[in-house]
């Protein structure tokens, strides 16, 4: 083997070694990431699905039970925030159902959840159907885990 061939062979081996080291490093870094997955957030997803289904079923007691007693609810419209306490918000929701001329249903269409053992934040896209009218929007939740399960302490929502 000539010096040129040896040099070329060493360059090829160095190239392969650098790429192999990069792949090993990438897998090691992936292992350092939090083990967040859909199954890790299954309890939060179940809670949020329950939240939407109680509202759609006009189960205002069940719906109200999703909130912490100190919850604040904020509706954002054109950059202006309108905030309410829980009692006023639930009263408004009850009136909405009571005065609706057609059935209303709201279903989640996408959930993004960030959580730990005590708290969770979720951004949930939803679709509200009132007869033939469809409204899309987003609910941004802050949840806390209580002895009775997850509770909403903050809800910020808006329509598209």
Image (tube, rainbow, N blue to C red):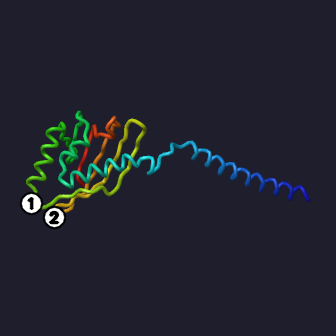
Instruction: Say which mark, if any, is on residue 101.
Output: 1
The picture places residue 28, in percent across and down from the top left corner, at 62, 45
Which label sits on residue 128?
A: none
Q: Residue 10: horizontal and vertical position, in percent?
A: 81, 53
Q: Is mark 1 on a helix, strand or loop?
A: loop
Q: Secondary structure under badge 2?
A: loop
Alpha carbon separation for disc pair 2 and 1: 9 Å
Label 1 crowd bin: few (<14), some (14–19), many (20+), radius 10 Å: few
Mark 2 crowdedness (10 Å alpha carbons): few <14, some 14-19, many ≥20:
few
Residue sitting nearer the eye, 8 or 159: 159
How many numbered marks are there? 2
Identify the residue shown where x is 35% and y is 46%: 122
State the residue lying farthest toward the front: 148
Q: Which residue is drawn at 65% across and 51% down?
A: 23
Name, please, the residue furthest toward the right: 1
Pick the quarter of the image with the N terminus: bottom right
Do the residues bearing badges 2 and 1 touch, measured as CB atoms within 8 Å?
yes
Q: Where does label 2 land, which residue?
A: 131
Q: Residue at x 33, y 40 (%)?
A: 149
């Amino acid at each position: 083997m000539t010096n040129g061939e040896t040099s070329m062979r060493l360059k090829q081996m160095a190239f392969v070694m650098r790429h192999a080291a990069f792949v090993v490093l990438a897998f090691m870094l992936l292992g350092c990431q939090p083990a967040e997955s859909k199954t890790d957030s299954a309890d939060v997803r179940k809670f949020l699905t329950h939240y939407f289904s109680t509202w759609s079923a006009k189960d205002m007691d069940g719906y109200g039970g999703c909130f912490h007693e100190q919850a604040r609810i904020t509706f954002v419209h054109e950059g202006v925030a309108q905030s309410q306490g829980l009692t006023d918000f639930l009263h408004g929701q009850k009136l909405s159902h009571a005065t609706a001329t057609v059935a209303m249903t709201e279903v989640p269409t996408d959930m993004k959840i960030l959580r730990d053992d005590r708290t969770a934040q979720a951004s949930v896209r939803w679709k509200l159907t009132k007869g033939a009218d469809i409204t899309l929007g987003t609910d941004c939740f802050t949840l806390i885990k209580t002895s009775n399960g997850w509770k909403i302490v903050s809800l910020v929502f808006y329509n598209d």
